Image: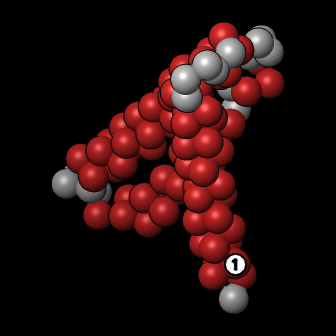
Amino acid sequence: MIQMLVIYMLLGGIGLSLWHSYRLIRISKQPGATVNAILDGRREKGLLIFGGAVAGFYVLTILFLMIFWKDLATWIVLTPFLYLVAWSLPRPFLKPN
């Protein structure tokens, strides 16, 4: 039961992060958008790419290492959590526009 709750919370967090990124990027693409909105959209796109790249690198590393150690298959479950951490961790350290 708790495993399902954790899985649903991770999927919900990923869905909310993608919706938030999509919304900011869409606002920055509208005609007449302010400079701050454009900069927010660019930063959001960068954070989205960074989160996806970190999670993708982690998955590829685990898949490569599974060739040698079959016990690592369970560690691939941390991929959504790692994406959310990589997507949200830099936010407090960024300057506001």
Q: Quadrant location of the C terminus?
A: top right
Horizontal side of residue 69 vs 48, given as left or right: left
Q: Is residue 37 above or below residue 80?
A: above
Residue 90 percent location from the top left of the image: 68, 25
Which amino acid, mark 1? Answer: Leu
User: In the current view of this chain or complex, which residue is farthest to the bottom?
Assistant: 1
Residue 57 percent location from the top left of the image: 36, 37
Horizontal side of residue 70 vs 19, given as left or right: left
Q: What residue is drawn where x is 36% and y is 64%?
A: 73
Q: What residue is drawn where x is 63% and y is 20%?
A: 33
Q: What residue is drawn where x is 53% and y is 55%?
A: 80
Q: Quadrant of residue 3?
A: bottom right
Looking at the rendered structure, the secondary structure element under dot 1 is helix
Residue 82, visible in the rendered structure: no
In the foreground, 44 or 76: 44
Q: Quadrant of residue 72?
A: bottom left
Q: Is residue 65 above or below residue 76?
A: above
Residue 13, visible in the rendered structure: yes
Q: Quadrant location of the N terminus?
A: bottom right
Q: Which residue is mark 1?
A: 5
In the foreground, 39 or 10: 39
In the foreground, 90 or 61: 90
